[in-house]
Structures are given as C-alpha cells and as structure tokens.
Amino acid sequence: MTVSTQGLHIRTRTRSRIVSETVELLSSMRFSISLLTVICIASVIGTVLKQHEPFNNYVNQFGPFWADVFASARLTSVYSAWWFLLILAFLVVSTSLCIARNTPKILADFKVYKENIREQSLKAFPHRAESTLVETPQAAANRIGQTLLGSGWKVKLQSRDTPHGQGWMVAAKTGAANKFGYIAAHSAIVLVCIGGLLDGDLMVRAQTWFNGKSAFTGGGLIADVPAQHRLSSSNPTFRANLLVTEGTTASTAILAQPTGVLLQDLPFSVELKKFIVEYYETGMPKLFASDIVITDFETGEKKEARVEVNHPASHRGINIYQSSFDDGGSRVKLQAVPLNRPTRPFEIEGTIGSSSALSNGDDKLVLEYTGLRTINVENFAGVNPASGVDVRKVDLRSSIESRLGSGHKTVTEKTLRNVGPSITYKLRDAAGQAVEYHNYMLPMEIEGARMYLLGLRETPSEPFRYLRIPVDENDSMDGFVRLRAALDDPQMRELAVRRYAVSAVEDGRPELAEALVASATRALALFAGAEPSVQLTPVASGTSSKAPVQGGLQAVSTFLENNVPQAERERASEVLVRILNGTLFELLQVSRERASLAPLERNDATQQFMTQAVISLSDTFFYPAPMTFQLKDFTHVQASVFQVARAPGQSIVYLGCLFLIVGVFAMLYVRERRLWVWLAPSGEQSSTATMALSSNRKTMEADREFELLKTQLLKVPA
C-alpha cells in the first residue's frame, strides 16, 4: 500500500465544494507537514528568545520598536500564545484525519496477499527469477509454503486452471509491522499535542475567558486578593511557583501572566521545616533539598517528605518539585560609609525585600534591600574576580561551549574560591530612578593587594562595575575613608601642602618653597574638585562647548590639556603627578594625626596603598551616591522555591513518546516484503517456477535475501 499525500475526499448531499475541499486540506499530509514546520520555527524562536521576561528587559536588549513587535506577536511567550495553541489544535485535527483516512486501508492491507497477480506482472519486478523444478506444481507449492512458514512468512496458496493443467500461486508476505509504525508514529503526534494542550495554560486561559478570572496587578497580602484573581483548587491543570520560608507555611501558588499574576489555591499546605544546601570544596552547590510537611485540608493528614532536584514529592495528583531557593527575609545590618561628600557614618537595619527612607536635607533617597549572598564563588585564575557570580546559576551552555568549537580551543584551568558574603541594594531617588549596588563584606586579594570591591550598575542588562578600595594596616577601609574626608577639608589640604613643601625643599630657599606651595595647592585643589576645571567638547557646528569636570585625575588631565602646550605636556604631567602623590601622602599622615594614630612609615606596603588609593580617590568622583553601604552583620533566613504542577497530560505525553519510539523503529528497521511464486505445469513430474520479490525499500539486504530465497525455494545454485 502506498501512503498518499492527498486528503480525505467526502461526498456531501449538497455537493458543497467548500466542505469537501476543507476536509481534504485538513486531512492531507502536506497540510500536516506545513503545520509541523511552523511549530518547529516557533520552537526555535522560543528557545533563542528568553521567555516570560519583564518587558523592560526586551526594551533594553532589542530597543522599543522590536520589543513592541515581539510583544504584539507574543514571541515573548511562544508556547502559550493563542496562535501556537491554535496551530497545535489544527495539527491534532489534521493528523487525526490522516490516521482515519489511512488506517482502514492499512488494516485491509494486512489481510490481502495479492494472490491474484498475473504471471506476466511478475516479470516486471526488479527481483525476479525463473527455474524448472522436478516436481508437480502442487507438491512444489506445498514445499515452498512450508519453507516460508518456517522462516516467519505468512503464506496463502491458490490453484488456477491453465491450458496445460492445474497451476499453483504461492503468495507470501512478512514485515507487516512496518504499517503499524505509520499508525503509531502519527498517533504519537496526536497524543503529544493533546498532552501539551492539556498541560499548557489552555485551561487557565479558558477560565479567564469564560469564568470571569483576571490577572492581579496590585500588591498587599495574598489573603486579601479578591476571588476573581484566584483559581480553584479543583483546577484540572496548572504549573505554578510556591515560595515557602523556613518555619512558615504556604498554600497559595503564583502563576505568572503577561499582565500580572493569578493565584492558585492548593488543596493542602506546605510547611518548610528546613532547607538544606551542600557545597563542594570550591563553594559550588551540589545538593538542594527541602524537608517539608504536607497538611491535607480535607482529611487533616500530615505527611513528611523531602524534595530534591529530580526527586519531587506528590500529593493528591499534584507534584512538588524543587525549583530553586531564595532569601526568605534575612535581617541585615549595614554601615554607611561616606565616599564623595561629607556625610556622617551611621548604621541601618532592614530585611531583604523591604526598603528604608533616607534623607539629607533636600536629598531624599529610598534604600531597597534586594539580595544577600552568603557564598560567592569567584574564579581567581587570571580573571578579575569581580563578576558577582550567583552560585545558584548552572551555566551549562558556557560549560559546553568552552569544550566545543575549533580544534585549538582548550579549557582554562579555574581557581575557584569563596570570597564570603555580599549585599545587593538599590538607591532610588525622588524621581524614581534607581542605581543597583553590589558590595562584598570582606576584602579580597587582587594582583597582590587586598581591597574592598564596591559594584554598581544603572540597568539590570549591564554587568557590575567595581570601585576598588585599598585596605589599611588593620585590613579595613577606615584609612581610605579618612583620606577621602581629608581631601574635602581645605584646612587639612593646606596643612598637607605646607608639610610637603617643607620636606621637599632645602632650607634657605623660601622662594622655591612658595612656588612649590602654589603648585601643590593648585594640583591638590584640582584633584579634590575644589577648583573648577572644564573640558572643551566639540559640537556639530565645529565649535566647542565646555563640559565641567568634577575632580580626580581627569580634572588634572583636563587642566594640562587646556593650559600647557602639547610639547611640554608630558614633562609637566610627570612633575604635577609627583607633586600630587607627595601631597596626598602628607594628607594621609595629617588624617592619621587627627585620628590619634601613628604616622605610616615609607615602605613598600605604604607605597602600594598610596598607588591604589590615588586611583580609587579619582574614581570616587564618578560614584553616583554620597555614601556606600557595607554589610556589617546579618541573620540568614532561607526560602525554598517549589514548582507545583497538576499535569494530567503527562501520562498521555509519555504514551505518545512510547508510540513514537515504536513507530520510528518499525518504519526504519522493519521492511515489508511480498513474495510470489507461480508454478505452472510443464510435464508429468515437472513444473516451471517464476518468482518475484517486492520490498518497500531497496537495500543490499533485500538483494541478499532474494538470492537466498532463490537457493531455498527454486533450488538455484548460489
């Protein structure tokens, strides 16, 4: 039987061509293949483009125009888009009609041996042979039939009257399971699509369309959310997230929607007794597990269970998976450290996920506590360990790409180290604009020097940029903070300049000392931002506009560019930087004197501190906040993120996968063959045999099988 690509043709009493052509199109193989092609393309888009991200993320990555295009076409949620579900529904209908059209023919073909084929037709087959047998046609037919039966063939004998006597036709077939492969493979497509539709959000959408449910966009307590934003515990299918903090109980899961969230009530509650996370020696996690207690609302039964990755718990047809873990409201104590404005240090406490209002005169800021990481694993093998890598992220794609590609690609050896806790927070101004900060609690050694890392970024799409603060002899940043505060004090700057001039100029040369004082005062004022400095910026008309420079090395460089000829600029910059470094060292000594500390000795450690301190002081002028917040103490509270799912289509999908495996193997590895042997009388004890073999695939194996059959049945020498 040949499978046709045409559709099912029906005859209607009204002879409506529209109905007939529609049914023919839906049941045709070409229509099914077209739908499969569209689904494959949509699946590729859904794999490449991140799904269910906030709209602002798409705007930052692709721009507002393409973000609107993607949102309008629902490419940001492909698998729940109405057009994707519609294509799946059409594919189910089309494939079902294909099965309905071809299954009767296949079943009928199982019973047909095609024994009525003519002798002349056998000579048209590619595999054919003729021979003369020394036995009657009937005896030869019985012998050939028994031989084929013993080899697993199904055989049917037919006698025919010929002018020369009675002839016999032996019709045999084997490999009929190949046709079952067609039915199984196409049935698998239907089952997988039906299972996908059942386990998708089709039921949730139906409730929003016909049951008056709508997404919730507000805030507040979960218990206060109205009923129109809640789904019943008898919801036949859903997949939602459940956040449970250690020592607390939750019974309402959250389904993310494009315009908000829907709340899914569960028929039981989940209490998190303890969250367990185990780490490798490198600090990477190797086990996430949650010890939970499930309390059934209907029976009051309590059941203890442990949920691990790939080892879910189940209750009343709902599976509970370990999805991730999060902060459950840890309590943190932060120390405010002034950086680029005179600000008094203070301490503030808060909970992760909450916020605190800050004010300094007219400046109003909101401090948002966004994240606490107790473990930060960084790679110290020749890479800047200021990446802020989240240990909960398993970057499988990067791991694979590092080992694949060109032949010369090698895997760089990593030196992983836990650098301790870190705090992430946001400072939001009165206009609602926020800058995100990421500060490590402990200093780390980078390029032979110990320093604190203070990270910041304006948008979530960009990586953190880190300000390096060198530590003092007590492994703290107090020395740098005192130096930064002294830089803003005119009296301390003047005292440092005088001391530097005295130490740098020999006695008896007052005029040189006064010149050095003037130069040092000018350099230190430029560096401190006390003396205005502007940079000429070209504009479109060819003229120049003046852009202010706050301070730091950038201000010194701008001053040299504007006031020193280019030929003398290099020499002048060397002299000015030498004066600046000497003055800053004296400023450091003055700040220690005011703090009742002993002066620093001139050694390598002090030189290393001053080298990094000058760069860090210059960078503080670009720090957008007047202070930074250092993590001083914390009380860590874990929370477990579960995925709760009721998936009635899961068994259907598994059955479809089994059908698909059976069908593919049947179609690929089972060959359908048919054999005919016509035995015509040619004498009293002899007959003429004509044999032909047909196969659904032309292979070398079919050639070898035919040669073997010739030897066994027709007694033709190999």
Image (tube, rainbow, N blue to C red):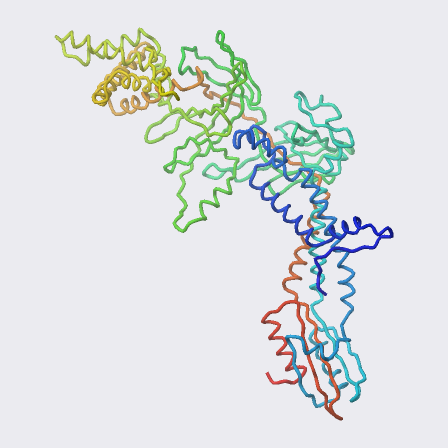
Quadrant of the rendered structure where residue 186 is? bottom right
Question: Furthest residue to the right?
Answer: 13
Residue 501 seen in the current view: yes
Residue 414 lies, in percent from the top left, at 41, 40
**Which residue is located at x 35 percent, y 23 percent?**
470
Q: Position of residue 562 (x, y in %)?
A: 28, 17
Asked whether 430 or 334 is in front, the reply is: 430
Q: Which corner quadrant holds the N terminus? A: bottom right
Determine whether 204 is above or below 602 in the image: below
Frontmost residue, 148 versus 646: 148
Residue 292, placed above or below residue 705: above
Q: Nearer the viewer, residue 542 or 553?
A: 542
Indicate the position of residue 701 as horizontal and vertical percent values: 60, 71
Q: Is residue 461 left or right of residue 480?
A: right
Label total for image: 0
Counting from the top left corner in percent of width and height, residue 30 is at 68, 53
The part of the image, by quadrant, that contains residue 11 is: bottom right
Please tell me which residue is depicted at 72% across the width and 35% down the height of the picture: 204
Residue 595 at least partly seen:
no
In the rendered view, would you say 301 is above or below 656? above
Residue that sits furthest to the left in the current view: 508
- Which residue is depicted at the point 41% across and 32% down? 385
Question: Which residue sits at x=47%, y=25%?
Answer: 457
Task: Classify residue 512 as left or right of residue 71.
Answer: left
Q: Quadrant of the C terminus?
A: bottom right
The foreground one among 294 and 613 is 613
